[in-house]
Amino acid sequence: MSERVLKDCRIYHGGYDLSGRESEIVLAYGAEIRDRTAGATTARQKLAGLTAAEVSGGGYWDPQVNDAALFEGLALDAQVLTVVPASGAPGSLAYTMRAADGEYSPSGAVGDLIGYDFAAYGIGALVRGVVMESATLDASGAGTPRELPAVPEGKALHAALHVLGVEGTGAPGVTVTIESSAANTWDGSETVRVEFDAALAPGAQWAALPGPVTDTWWRVSWTVTGTEPGIRVVVVLGIK
């Protein structure tokens, strides 16, 4: 059985975790269908055109959890937005994209919980991928390797990094890299494919690695700085 009840899902918006306040989430993905009917035909001919993605939904307003993210994100381009229709554990299916927040409407009646609606519109591709890491990092290290398809010519490996919390003293931060291997060998022969900028505060970054890449094994590694650090990160990889 493939049916699932939608519960315990995750929504990451830039450097914010909006999970736990949403009561509804809609991921809409489609393509413009164009007419290409020529004269010598007896039936309409159609052709898929540009694609478009939108994430919308609503939930319960919280000034500390979701108001700042959605208010500050209005009209900003290239926000990194990730929806995980599961617990968000490593290995989970994830949908990620860069987006522009276009709508945010908190509202409520006297005596009711304050609610809100929001909508964000994709900039570029909607990527179906996998959660590679979801953890609070306190030391440098590397995650579990995962096998993904090779990246063919004309497509790219897309990587989304959400830094959701930075704690510690002495300039705590993290530098995250994406590495690949042809045979799941991590003895120094692996290749660094993406290196994100050092993150010293909550935020998000996006990277795209054009194909072809024949390696099929991937992992996330990180270098953590600071004293008694606690850096909460989510990393998603997908091919589009």
Image: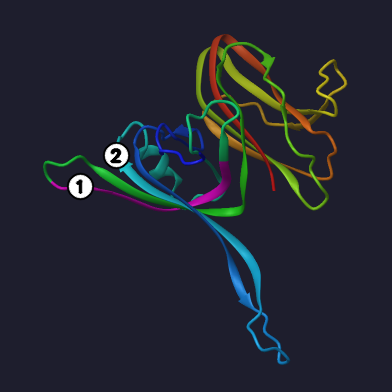
Q: Say which residue appears at 51% left-offset and 30% top-offset.
A: 88
Q: Amino acid at mark 2?
A: Trp
Q: 15 or 95, which lies in front?
A: 95
Q: 230 or 134, which lies in front?
A: 134
Q: Say which residue appears at 65% left-offset and 68% top-offset.
A: 48
Where does residue 162 sit, x and y in percent of width and height?
Answer: 56, 32
CB within 8 Å, label 2 to label 1: yes
Q: Marks 2 and 1, Cα distance to the nearest angstrom?
A: 10 Å
Residue 61: assigned label: 2
Q: Residue furthest top?
A: 228
Q: Count up the numbered dots.
A: 2
99 in magenta: yes
Q: Residues within 10 Å of mark 1 (few under 14, many from 20)?
A: few
User: In this image, 116 relative to 34: left or right?
Assistant: left
Q: Which residues are magenta?
A: 95-109
Q: Say which residue appears at 40% left-offset and 34% top-offset.
A: 7
Q: 231 or 76, which lies in front?
A: 231
Q: Residues within 10 Å of mark 2 (few under 14, many from 20)?
A: many
Compared with 164, 206 (above or below) is below
Mark 2 and mark 1 lie on one chain; the one further toward the N terminus is 2
Where does residue 93 sit, x and y in percent of width and height?
Answer: 57, 36
Compared with 48, 136 (above or below) is above
In the picture, residue 212 is in which quadrant?
top right
Q: Secondary structure at mark 2?
A: loop
Q: Secondary structure at mark 1?
A: loop
Residue 108: assigned label: 1
